[in-house]
């Protein structure tokens, strides 16, 4: 598939201030609930398009909330399949090449699973409104402990020393990976405006990549300042052929292979996961 072309207006119309909006009560995220107006951003913030390097099968029943690539496999956290048959939230180990679920653990039925991260030999999972997170043994998914936090839980990643968490606002929280106590926070901004709806997170070469919920945009964030240093335009990454009449939900799910420098993206109920190469438009 050729590199995606930015629409003429996108260079000035990509998100610079997306107003905060709520996820719907039935657990699915209503794209219509997000603000569609996308004010201007400074021209100096680069906007990356992409080239699809490879596409892989992805479970179309997975309501993707968190994604991590480690030791040649994917770890995925999912929310409940609201409106569809099947069980609720899960954590799973997935074969990249085939999309086969190699290991699966379902959380309690009343829990709405959100972002995940890996620290040492533990997998850490947030929940949406429960104010509770869980830790599991990475090899067996055996539950180890739980912890509490005062906000909603959306996205989670790890920089190797700290957990980094989003809650749907413009704030990134830094937390101790053992106690989960808050040890810092930063407000994400572009053009001095707060960027709300920070969702699934991934640590990529010293930056935090964040899905902006309800859009096809990923923000590249400097974790020291909170400033957006780049936008990734993921428009049309899931084409009509890949949709094939299926019901799909929003663009959500970023994973990075630090060893081989590969970037993967997907979405909720998407039938494909994509390895993409970022392309910076010529001046």
Image (tube, rainbow, N blue to C red):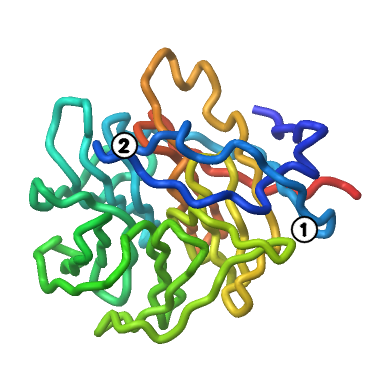
Q: Residue at x 12, y 37 (%)?
A: 87
Q: Which is in the foreground here, disc 1 or disc 2?
A: 2
Q: How far is mark 1 from mark 2, CA to CA?
A: 31 Å
Which of the 4 image quarters holds residue 206?
Answer: bottom right
Return the x and y of residue 231 as percentages of the image width and height: 67, 52
Residue at the far right in the pictured view: 283
Instruction: Classify residue 140 as left or right of residue 276.
Output: left
- Disc 2 crowd, CA 10 A, few/some/many (<14, 14-19, 20+): some
Residue 156 x, y percent position in the rendering: 38, 64
Residue at 25 percent of width and 66 percent of height: 123
* Side of 135 where 143 appears, left or right: left
Q: Judge from the rendering whether residue 100 lies leftward or rightward of residue 42; answer left or right.
A: left
User: Number of numbered discs present?
Assistant: 2
Determine the residue located farthest toward the top in the rendered image: 245
Q: Circle 1 is placed at which residue position?
A: 45
Q: Is residue 230 above or below residue 241?
A: below
Viewer-nearest residue: 58 or 11? 11
Considering depth in this image, is 235 or 34 the residue closer to the camera? Answer: 34
Residue matched to label 2: 28
Quarter of the picture holding the N terminus? top right
Does residue 165 appear in the picture of this structure? yes
- Residue at position x 82%, y 46% in the image: 281
**Residue occupying image coordinates x 27% and y 31%:** 61
For residue 259, say whether it is visible: no
- Image side of residue 54 versus residue 128, left or right: right
Q: Nearer the viewer, residue 51 or 236?
A: 236
- Secondary structure of residue under mark 2: loop
Please say if 128 is above or below 225. above
| Mark with earlier residue (1, 2) | 2
Q: Position of residue 82 (x, y in %)?
A: 22, 33
Q: Position of residue 60 (x, y in %)?
A: 32, 29
């Amino acid at each position: 598939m050729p590199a995606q072309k930015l629409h003429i207006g996108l260079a000035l119309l990509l998100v610079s201030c997306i107003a905060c909006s709520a996820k719907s009560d039935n657990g699915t995220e209503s794209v219509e609930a997000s603000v569609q107006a996308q004010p201007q951003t400074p021209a100096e913030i680069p906007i990356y398009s992409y080239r699809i390097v490879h596409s892989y099968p992805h479970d179309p029943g997975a309501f993707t909330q968190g994604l991590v690539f480690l030791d040649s496999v994917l770890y995925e956290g999912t929310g409940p399949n609201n409106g569809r048959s099947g069980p609720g939230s899960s954590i799973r180990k997935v074969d990249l090449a085939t999309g086969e679920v190699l290991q699966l653990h379902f959380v309690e039925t009343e829990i709405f699973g959100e972002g995940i991260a890996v620290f040492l030999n533990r997998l850490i999972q947030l929940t949406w409104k429960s104010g509770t997170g869980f830790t599991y043994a990475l090899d067996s998914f055996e539950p180890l402990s739980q912890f509490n936090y005062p906000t909603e839980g959306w996205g989670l990643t790890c920089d190797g020393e700290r957990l980094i968490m989003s809650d749907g606002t413009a704030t990134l929280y830094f937390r101790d990976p053992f106690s989960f106590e808050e040890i810092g926070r930063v407000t994400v901004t572009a053009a001095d405006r707060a960027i709300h709806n920070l969702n699934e997170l991934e640590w990529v070469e010293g930056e935090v990549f964040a899905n902006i919920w309800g859009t096809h945009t990923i923000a590249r964030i400097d974790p020291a300042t909170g400033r957006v240093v780049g936008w990734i335009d993921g428009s049309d990454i899931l084409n009509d052929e890949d949709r094939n009449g299926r019901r799909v939900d929003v663009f959500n799910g970023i994973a990075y292979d630090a060893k081989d420098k590969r970037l993967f993206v997907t979405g909720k109920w998407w039938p494909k996961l994509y390895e993409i190469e970022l392309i910076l438009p010529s001046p």
